[in-house]
Structure formats: C-alpha cells, structure tokens
Image (cartoon, rainbow, N blue to C red):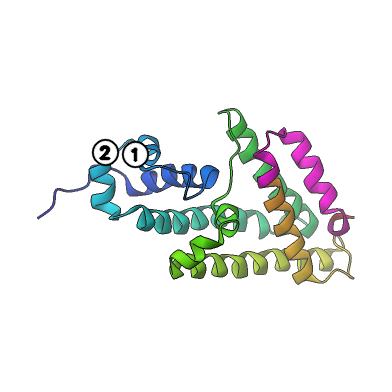
Amino acid sequence: MGRPRTFDESAVLDAVAGEFRVYGFAHTSTGQLCEAAGVRRSSLYNAFTSKDELFVRALEHYIDTIRGRQTAVLTEGGLRGADRLRALVDLVIAEERAAACQGHAAGCMVVQSFMNPDLRERDERIARILDRDLRERSSLLAEAIRSGQVDGSVPEDIDPDDGALLVSTVISGIRVTAQAGVDAETLRRIALAGLRALLS
C-alpha cells in the first residue's frame, strides 16, 4: 500500500498550470514543475504517473478554474451584455497585471495548447478538452452578446456566434501580446479597440 499524499492536489495543479500556461508543454521541465509545486519528483509522478498525465490533469483543472471566473462575469445579471464583455477583458488584464509584477506574462494553457498542434495528436484527451472548452466558452460569449442585444448595449446586426469568436480571438491575442512585455493599460486599450464593433 502506497504512502498517503502529503500535498494538496488542487494547489499542485494550480502551480504546474502556471508553468505550462507560460512556457507550454515542451519548454516546461520536470524540475520546473517540481519547484513550482514545491514537491519532489517522486511525489509528483506517484500521483500523476507522467508529465503527459500531469499536463492533461492540469489543463482540465485550469479550464475549470478559468471557466468558473469567466462564467461568473459573463452571466452577471446586474450587468448589461456589453458591460459583461468589458468585465471579461478587465478580468484577463488583471491576471496579466498581476503576472507582470512577478516578471512574466500570465499566459494561457488553452492558447499555448492550440498553438502546438502536436499536443492534440499526442493525446486525444487534449483534443477533446480543447474542443469542448471552445464550444462551451463560445456558447457563454454568444449568450452574453444576445443579452446585450436585448438590453440595447450590443448592436442587433452582430451575429452572436461571430461575435463570440471575435471575443475569443481578441482575448487570445492579448495573451500572446502580453508575452512581449506590453503593459496592462495598453493591452486593455487594444482589447477594447478590437471589440469596438460589439461595444458601440
């Protein structure tokens, strides 16, 4: 019988997701993951068996965590639809601002994973997780846009599905641009300019 775990699995997944989201799968070493999580290599692999398994679990955990935050913003009944989209931008920018104080961009595991198509081929679970996330995130965004069309804060001639893809594209672009060290205020200005068609 194995020894009981001496770490908080959720905290470990948060820590390793923080490395994967900035550096990606290929450029994140096991040493980095152990240091970030504050656990020994043996403990990490006793719990997760391999770097691949750890990545899959961390990706699921990351998406669930981020989705929870974004869902709260995008379904906030006290906000008009357009204001929900602005609040989403502010949520992302706040992450980038906090990460910049630590000397790096916040990054995004989903963006990193989509930019590395080999990952989808490496493990079909990754492809399923990413595809499901895109569908569910797009649905949330489209619903916020529809709400904005009802309350008059989003133009009626915008197709909600196209608008959702626009928002996802702008947010992904902000994550990538932040890697170049662009400051948070500039990132926010760029994001809102990119979404002007939805927010006018």
Amino acid type at mark 1? Cys
**In the rendering, at what x and y percent does residue 169 appear?**
72, 57
Q: Image point 35% across, 38% down: which residue?
A: 31
Mark 1 surroundings: few (<14), some (14-19) or many (≥20) residues within 10 A: some
Mark closer to the chain start, 2 or 1: 1
Q: Which mark is residue 34?
A: 1
Mark 2 = which residue?
40
Q: Are marks 2 and 1 in contact (CB under 8 Å)?
A: yes
Asked which quadrant contains residue 100, the reply is: top right
Asked which quadrant contains residue 41, the reply is: top left
Q: Image point 58% across, 34% down: which residue?
A: 99
**In the rendering, at what x and y percent does residue 6 appear?**
23, 42
Q: Image point 38% across, 57% down: which residue?
A: 52
Residue 6 position (above or below residue 134):
above
Quadrant in the picture for the C terminus: bottom right
Residue 167 position (above or below residue 89):
below
Q: Is residue 53 left or right of residue 200?
A: left
Magenta residues span: 175-198
